[in-house]
Image (tube, rainbow, N blue to C red):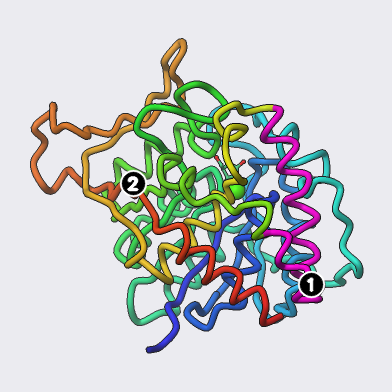
Amino acid sequence: MNPIKVLIDCDTGIDDIVALSYALKTPDLEVLGVTTVCGNLPTDITTYNTLNALHLMGRDDIPLARGADRPLERPLQDAAYIHGSNGLGGYEFPEKTSKTPVDQPAWEFLHAKLCEQSEPIDILALAPLTNIALLLQKHPDALARIRRIVFMGGSLRTGNPTPVATFNVLADPEAAKYMIATKVPFVMCSLDCTRGSYLTFEELESTRQFQNPVADMVRQVTGFYITSTKKENTVDGKKKGIDIHDLCTVMYVTHPELFEGESYFADVETKGELTTGFTLVDYEDNLRKPAEDKTVYFLKKVDREAYVRYFLDTLATY
Ligand code: BDR
Ligand code: CA
């Protein structure tokens, strides 16, 4: 089977870099380009981390475009308390890259890449949706060129970091609301799903045998994440391991057979006093929306063991 062509938008970020380690090495994907945005940390840091991640993973051939410095309508509230002040829990790249971003902002780069393709392709959104919303606002023709947005974020009821909102929605709720309203096919890799996709400490420790710098990086960054998510998030803290949310999103594209999901109508709360960033998912069909409005394919569950096996098998090949 031919690899699936994708564009990746990220805010690297601990779970982003782990997701990249899989996405850039699996033979099932052809990554046409990577874009960066503000989210976990400001864009200077997410761009630096992503450029150096490409270098560490031997993929300097993949172009990177830098994106938005702030959400559409509000200031950035980052997640340095989870990812550390350098976004990678203090991890330092063994060698710094000389690679620089392309000379186009992310939304222009994404548009150009989509236009080069004869078929619509997937965009993997591992971050707040600011860049992708700007792409569609500036280039409405991009809608027909996107096969689907596969997004990490959203949930049925619970959230992180608020009781109801997931970070990638909360950081730019206007962008998420706008994206869903465009009716672009939208896969929501929800917190409900990613929280079942944890890696145990033993599984992470087992990567020591691979003796490669990418596996070493994965152990170091997740070591920090274990502590920060335990401290900051009591639900994650009760787990037998840690949730690498963004990795789950990439795995859906390469191995959809591992996932359970269903199509719903969904929307995003942008004005709630207590609930801004909440994804309203019409799970019980209370709103009786017609089928054409049920454009969000909500991922509920993943076969954790198979997912971990695919990830570790790929990490071993560096
Ligand atoms: C998501 O928010 C970010 O902190 C992570 O990188 C991930 O994309 C988890 O809710
Ligand atoms: Ca992310």
In the rendered image, which quarter is residue 54 located in?
A: bottom right
The C terminus - image quarter: bottom right
What residue would you read off at disc 1? 56
The part of the chain drawn in magenta is: 204-231
Tell which circle, 2 or 1, labels the residue nearer the N-terminal end.
1
Q: Quadrant of residue 142?
A: bottom left
Q: In terms of image quadrants, where is residue 49?
A: bottom right
170 vs 116, nearest the viewer? 170
Kind of residue indicated by mark 1:
Leu
Mark 2 vs ligand 1: CB under 8 Å?
no
- In x, y percent, where is residue 164? 45, 24
Tell us which disc is closer to us: 2 or 1.
Answer: 2
| Residue furthest top as drawn | 273
Dot 2 amino acid type: Lys
Mainly helix, strand or loop, the magenta region? helix
Question: Label 1 neighbourhood size at 10 Å, few (<14), some (14-19), many (20+)?
Answer: some
Q: Is residue 258 above or below residue 120?
A: above
From the viewer's side, name the closer residue of 235 and 191. 235
Tell me the quadrant of the picture where the N terminus can be found: bottom left
Q: Is residue 305 magenta?
A: no
Task: In the rendered view, tell whether residue 36 sits above or below residue 212.
Answer: above
The secondary structure type at the circle numbered 2 is strand
Vertical arrangement, residue 112 with respect to residue 85, above or below: below
Residue tagged by mark 2? 300
Q: What residue is at 75 percent from the left and 65 percent from the top?
A: 53
- Residue 161, numbered label: none
